[in-house]
Image (cartoon, rainbow, N blue to C red):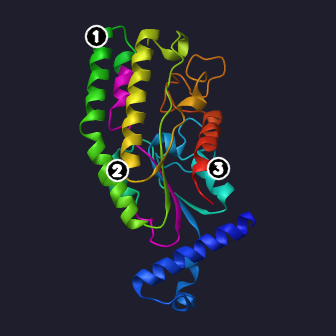
């Protein structure tokens, strides 16, 4: 069976399932008023790592920094689906709930990716605290982030994932994690964040990944974990896929090569 045949059969199966649930016949769905029900769509939800901050070629001057090089754009092209690119720089879980769910549909939403949680843990604030020379301040900021990740964040993610499933109940939903940022070596791009502090930050990134993966598993969602792919490509590495300090919003975000790596991790989990 070819790629296109597989996608067509998948859509017909989903349409038939929804028809059965709603009491409609499949022929009843094939009317002019509902002819677009088989248009397959991919909805990308999340924060700056999902929108592509750092990867350049931004699509609009709206503060979301959605990049033409971001993994949702690449994946949608590969899948041949219409992309609703909702991910936005700075988004927290509550922002995704409030602003990014409007294009989730019961039938023709084929794929959803969700990448959010770092802003809820306050990682940008943590990086700011660690960029100085006060190690105690850095360690306290990391401890606070870890507390958020283990206490309030799981419930927020649980609520978000439930809402997404309820709105797009037939979609393939993949939760996307974040890489470790640092190579745990000193360089100008890491500012004054010492290798020891970098190790603590990487440990916090691991905690975020493990926590997010556990909530995703509770909902039956696959977890796209980019950490292994980014090993050896953090800030200060010989071949960085994550930008160091740039003086703007792109600091400590994946570059275009990093988004390519994300695509390689995410795409195999989007069943087609």
- The answer to which of marks 2 and 3 sits earlier in the sequence is 3
Residue at mark 2 to residue at mark 3: CA–CA distance: 24 Å
Q: Which mark is residue 136?
A: 1
- The answer to which of marks 1 and 3 sits earlier in the sequence is 3
Comparing labels 2 and 3, the label whose residue is closer to the camera: 3
Q: Which quarter of the rendering shows the N terminus?
A: bottom right
- The answer to which of marks 2 and 1 sits earlier in the sequence is 2
Please tell me how many numbered marks the rendered image carries: 3
- Examine the rendering and report whether any part of residue 39 can be seen: no
Residue at mark 2 to residue at mark 1: CA–CA distance: 31 Å
The residue at the point 45 percent across, 89 percent down is 24
* Start-end of magenta stretch: 102-128
> What is the secondary structure assignment of the residue under circle 2?
helix
The residue at the point 46 percent across, 78 percent down is 18
Q: Residue 62's spot in the image, x, y percent?
A: 48, 49
Q: Which is nearer the eye, 163 or 96?
A: 163
Callout 1: 10 Å neighbours few (<14), some, many (20+)? few
What residue sits right under mark 2 in the picture? Answer: 95
Residue at mark 1 to residue at mark 3: CA–CA distance: 41 Å
Residue 105 within the magenta-colored segment of the rendering:
yes
Q: Which mark is residue 74?
A: 3
Left or right: residue 239 compared with residue 114 = right
- Examine the rendering and report whether any part of residue 131 can be seen: yes
Q: Residue 121's spot in the image, x, y percent?
A: 32, 34
């Amino acid at each position: 069976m070819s790629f296109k045949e597989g996608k067509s059969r998948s859509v017909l199966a989903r349409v038939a399932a929804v028809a059965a649930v709603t009491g409609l016949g499949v022929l009843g769905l094939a009317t002019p008023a509902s002819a677009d029900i088989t248009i397959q769509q991919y909805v990308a939800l999340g924060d700056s790592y999902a929108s592509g901050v750092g990867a350049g070629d931004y699509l609009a001057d709206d503060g979301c920094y959605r990049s033409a090089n971001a993994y949702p754009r690449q994946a949608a092209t590969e899948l041949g689906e219409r992309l609703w690119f909702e991910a936005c720089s700075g988004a927290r879980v509550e922002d995704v709930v409030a602003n990014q769910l409007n294009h989730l549909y019961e039938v023709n939403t084929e794929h959803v990716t969700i990448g959010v949680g770092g802003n809820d843990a306050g990682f940008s604030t943590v990086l700011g605290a660690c960029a100085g020379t006060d190690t105690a301040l850095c360690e306290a900021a990391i401890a606070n982030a870890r507390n958020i990740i283990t206490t309030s964040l799981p419930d927020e993610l649980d609520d978000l994932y439930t809402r997404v499933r309820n709105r797009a109940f037939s979609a393939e939903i993949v939760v996307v994690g974040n890489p470790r940022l640092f190579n745990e070596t000193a360089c100008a791009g890491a500012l004054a964040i010492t290798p020891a502090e970098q190790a603590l930050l990487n440990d916090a990134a691991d905690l975020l990944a493990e926590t997010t993966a556990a909530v995703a598993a509770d909902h039956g969602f696959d977890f796209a974990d980019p950490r292994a792919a980014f090993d050896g490509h953090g800030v200060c590495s010989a071949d960085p896929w994550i930008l160091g300090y740039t003086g703007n919003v792109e600091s400590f975000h994946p570059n275009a090569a990093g988004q390519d790596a994300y695509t390689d991790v995410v795409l195999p989990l989007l069943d087609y």
